[in-house]
Image (cartoon, rainbow, N blue to C red):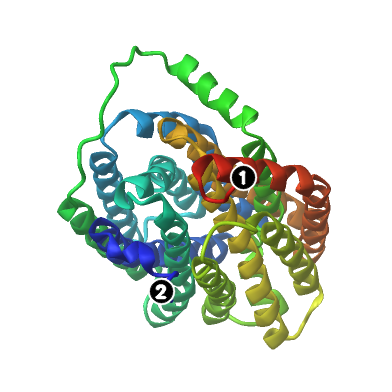
Amino acid sequence: MKHSLRALKHPNFRLFFAGQTVSVIGTWIHAVAMSWLVYRLSGSALLLGLTGFASMAPLFFLAPLMGLLADRVDRRRLLLITQVFAAIHAAVMAGAAYADLLSAWHVIVLATLLGVIQAADTPLRQTFLAEMVTAREDLPSAVALSAFMQQAGRLIGPTIAGLLMAASSEALCFLVNAMSKLGVIAAVAAMKIGERPQKRRQARVLADLADGLRYAWDTVPVRILLPSLAAVSFFVAPYQALMPIFAAEIFHGGAETLGYLMAAAGLGGGIAVLLLAGRKDVRGLARIILVAAVTAGAALLAFSQTRLLWLAYVLLFLVGAGMLVVITGTSTILQTIVEDEKRGRVMSLYTMSFLGMIPMGSLAAGALAERLGAITTLAASGACCLGAGFALWMKLPVLRSNIRAHYVRLGIVRE
């Protein structure tokens, strides 16, 4: 625990951790309610996939620009702005839902607007960690605790969403999310962050973007890890978009069953990132990422074939654990080795590879499930993830040697 929690000795990170935890719970309540509302209104697997695509596709297309913006502006102020817009968006959805004005297509349009807000917020939060936690040796703890925060929200949020929808309606879920954003707004406003030295820059957006891409390609761990993360995100993460079908048609449940299934994956992810946070240093993460990718793919393949609800919970626990180890392990390595002036652009590429690929996978999974069924779709996704794990295994020696070279340069290990 001493190693797991060492990032909390930084006051700004403590504020962020407390406020963002409340906000993330609200975000997951909102996401599950939005998914259930579309399925209730349409009964369509394709529209479920389209909802997932709409809510996250802007991350893929806008993340590079937002990463460049994070390298240039006051990150704290920009984070405040994104959270205010997120609160307004949730309040608008709550009002429209209470007035019974929403159709499935209205929800998809509003999900797209939410995706634009998240495209600005996500790479910004990743980049902001280095300003809140100024000691490089504490960054792995900060990355893991941030991932744990997400998984705690993923564990608690869907369960609360299921209970709120059973007791009232999706509108209450949207309202709770709007209120949850007040926590992170207050936390960020209370932070004391020193001014970053700003270099005088010309408006060279395309040149700066190209410079970031060139740096990412020339940095071998980035060049290997990001495609692996993208493959796992594309093939595994979209199971969330199809989960209402499994909850209702395979396991013959309702909103509560959906919440518990999602929470099982969240519990697995939360425990996994706590174990990562408890590691003394960053060495050995490449091999752990490989094992996690294979575990996620195999568990998803097995989940697609089971009809036992208790076994489904166990398998989703493993899917969530494997996914989060790949995501958090990759982020930890990148946060450790990249140069600070390139951090925003590299982490925007990380966001594209992680969150940006999820909507692509959700859309493909929804379309495939419409034709072949949800069971076949998830079985194929799990098998493809296993293939991505094999490709990473082939590159593991090169990856480990190059990561070690960076650790030597930074003084993390001796030459």
Image quarter (top left, top right, bottom left or bottom right) of the C terminus: top right
Image quarter (top left, top right, bottom left or bottom right) of the N terminus: bottom left
> Residue at left 49%, top 31%?
64
Q: What is the tally of numbered marks visible in this picture? A: 2
Q: Position of residue 167 (x, y in %)?
A: 38, 82
Q: Position of residue 102 (x, y in %)?
A: 41, 55
> Residue at left 46%, top 19%?
208
Which of marks 2 and 1 precedes in the sequence?
2
The relative height of residue 359 versus residue 199 in the rendered view (above or below) is: below
Q: Position of residue 77 (x, y in %)?
A: 23, 40
Which residue is tagged 1?
Answer: 415
Which residue is tagged 2?
Answer: 2
Mark 1 lies on a secondary structure that is: loop
Q: CA distance from mark 1 to mark 2?
A: 28 Å
Determine if residue 210 is in view: yes
Q: Amino acid at mark 2?
A: Lys
Q: Amino acid at mark 1?
A: Glu
Given residues 75 and 49, the one toward you in this image is 75
* Label 1 CA crowd tier, 10 Å (few <14, some 14–19, many 20+): few
Q: Position of residue 151 (x, y in %)?
A: 48, 68
Q: Could you tell whether 235 is left or right of 32 in the image?
A: right
Q: Could you tell whether 244 is left or right of 389 in the image?
A: left
The relative height of residue 341 versus residue 282 in the rendered view (above or below) is: above
Mark 1 or mark 2: which is in front? Answer: 1
